[in-house]
Image: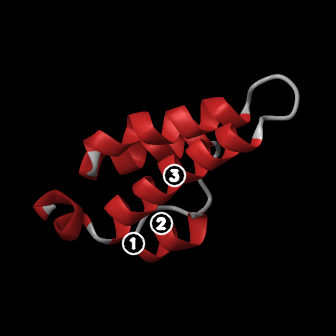
Amino acid sequence: MLRALGEQGYPEDAADDERLVSLVSVDHPDIADRFRHGQSILEQDGTPATENLRKAMLDFRSVLEDVLHPTERSAA
C-alpha cells in the first residue's frame, strides 16, 4: 500500500501508520475510519481468526481503491 500511496504523491517515508492516515484523510476523509478499523483487527491480542483477517483485508482494499480511483468509488 505504501508504494501505491507514494505513486499518488504521498510520502513513502511516513513515520507511522497514523501519520500516513492523517495525510491521506485530507484528500479522502471517509477512508480513515476503514483503515483504522482494519489496523485494530490486526493489532488484537493473539492470532486473529481467519474471518477477522478477511474483514481487515476488505477494509484495506476499500482504502486502496478509494485512493487509486476516487471518482469511481464516489460514483457508485
Q: CA distance from mark 2 to mark 1?
A: 5 Å
User: Residue flagged by tag 3: what amino acid is it?
Assistant: Leu
Residue that mark 3 sits on: 58
Q: How is the image coloured?
A: secondary structure
Q: Amino acid at mark 2?
A: Leu
Badge 1 crowding class, 10 Å Cα cut-off, few under 14, some 14 to 19, many 20 or more, is few
Question: Can you name the residue that lies furthest to the front here?
Answer: 51
Circle 2 residue: 5
Q: Which mark is in front, 1 or 3?
A: 3
Q: Which residue is at the far right? A: 46
Q: Are marks 2 and 1 in contact (CB under 8 Å)?
A: yes
Residue 8 placement: quadrant: bottom left
Q: Residue at x 49, y 47 (%)?
A: 59
Measured along the vertical axis of the image, is residue 73 above or below residue 34? below
Are the residues at dot 1 and dot 3 in contact (C-beta closer than 8 Å)?
no
Residue 76: % across, % down: 16, 61
Distance between the alpha carbons at the discs numbered 1 and 3: 21 Å
Which mark is first along the chain, 2 or 3?
Answer: 2
Q: Is residue 70 left or right of residue 39?
A: left
